[in-house]
Amino acid sequence: MRQQEQKYKIGIVCYPTFGGSGVLATELGIALSDKGYEVHFITYKQPVRLSMGFHPNTYFHEVKVPTYPLFEFPPYETALASAMVDVILKQNLDLLHVHYAIPHASAAYFARQILKKSGKDIPFITTLHGTDITLVGRDTTYEQVVTFSINESDAITAVSDSLKNETYEFFNIEKEIHVIPNFVDVRRFHQTDKHHFKQMLAPEGERILVHVSNFRPVKRVSDVIKIFEKVRKEIPAKLLMIGDGPDRQNVEDLARSLGLYNDIRFLGKQEQISEILSIADLFLLPSETESFGLSALEAMACSVPLIASNSGGLPEINIQGETGFLSNVGDIDDMAMNAICILKDITQLTEFKKHALAHARKFEKQHIIPMYEKLYCEVISAYRTEKENRLIAK
């Protein structure tokens, strides 16, 4: 049996997009590879953050999804399971870690059943990130499969206590859910001197507000514009909107109709988020729900206080009246009032920035990665012991 200090070969399955689950999975894989683990990413496209530098212990395996006239919707889950089997056998992996339940957990179960015929079946861990539980997974179309595949996982983690509780509330989960929060790399996310950028965007010393998301309805991006409108009436300000998605055109139209467009920059998807956050004074996140709020944590690591909804896991990272403020979902008047409270006085703004950074440091990756390492060791050891016992029983 391997000891904990030995390094495993880990397969990581995730969505390769700018969303929180893909970002966390990629950052986790990079951090593990830096510690000597061999990490294999299995997905349909190279993860965004994996392209930001060379990492010698990481490998990317592209999932190929063939198209045939028969298929109106190409069967990605089947192609993914086949890719998992191929990588596990050829690379002799010790563990699969799948991020986001749909369809990764069910594909992992499918792959393991195939592998049992070869005697090379391995355990898999499922990490729940949010909308796979709070939105998509609760759809009756998916609920039974989601419940089954989560329960078949050898371990389950969630990124916040809020998400853990919601999972138990809405699904018949029979196993323990381990809470391992998202983390931030303060070597990359920290405030740097970008005064020349700030001077270009806010030449009259205006306060700079920032929002980062995928512009889906759950993010309530129109609320960001409405909050900004109220703040701008009291304080000279600019707004930076980072990201893209289905609601972008609607909020651009809203900004024009309110006469705000010239004070807002819609920057689209950006990779160097830390440079933009370095010039920000306040981060706005009025989402309907957030399982954790990774973008908010990254902002706080850059010394940016937070105005957010009192929903999901956000109260677990945003300390009321210290790192920012929390308001009820949709209460733009309260959010705007709190934003003005932070921004109107430079001494107070400086205090909020200091507290935001101090709290973010509690989520530095060196505090969180060992929690995953410990779980990996426990799961692999238990799985191998159980497998040995089955062989002895035969």
Image (spheres, helix red, strand yellow):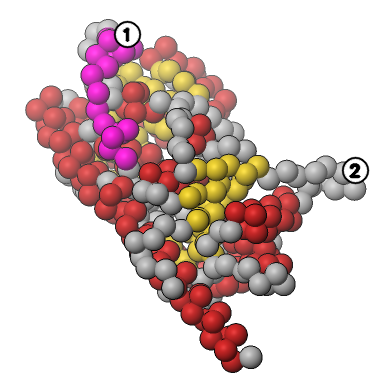
Provide residue 65's location: percent of width, then percent of height.
75, 45
**Residue depicted at x 56% and y 51%:** 13
Provide residue 244's location: percent of width, then percent of height.
53, 29
Q: Which residue is mark 2?
A: 69
309 relative position to 79: left or right: left
Query: So how many labels did they put on this image?
Result: 2
Bounds of the magenta segment: 185-202
Question: Residue 313 magenta-drawn?
Answer: no
Task: Tell me if I can see residue 179 in this picture.
Answer: no
Image quadrant in which the N terminus is located? bottom left
**Residue depicted at x 90% and y 48%:** 70
Asked if marks 1 and 2 touch (Cβ < 8 Å), the reply is no
Provide residue 162's location: percent of width, then percent of height.
38, 60
Q: Residue extending furthest right? A: 69
Identify the secondary structure beneath mark 2.
Answer: loop
255 relative position to 71: left or right: left
First in residue order: circle 1 vs circle 2: 2
Q: Is residue 388 above or below residue 36?
A: below
Kindly identify the amino acid type of the residue bearing the numbered disc 1: Met
Q: Which residue is mark 1?
A: 200
Image quadrant in which the C terminus is located? bottom right
Kindly identify the amino acid type of the residue bearing the numbered disc 2: Pro
Identify the secondary structure beneath mark 1.
Answer: helix
Provide residue 329's location: percent of width, then percent of height.
38, 47
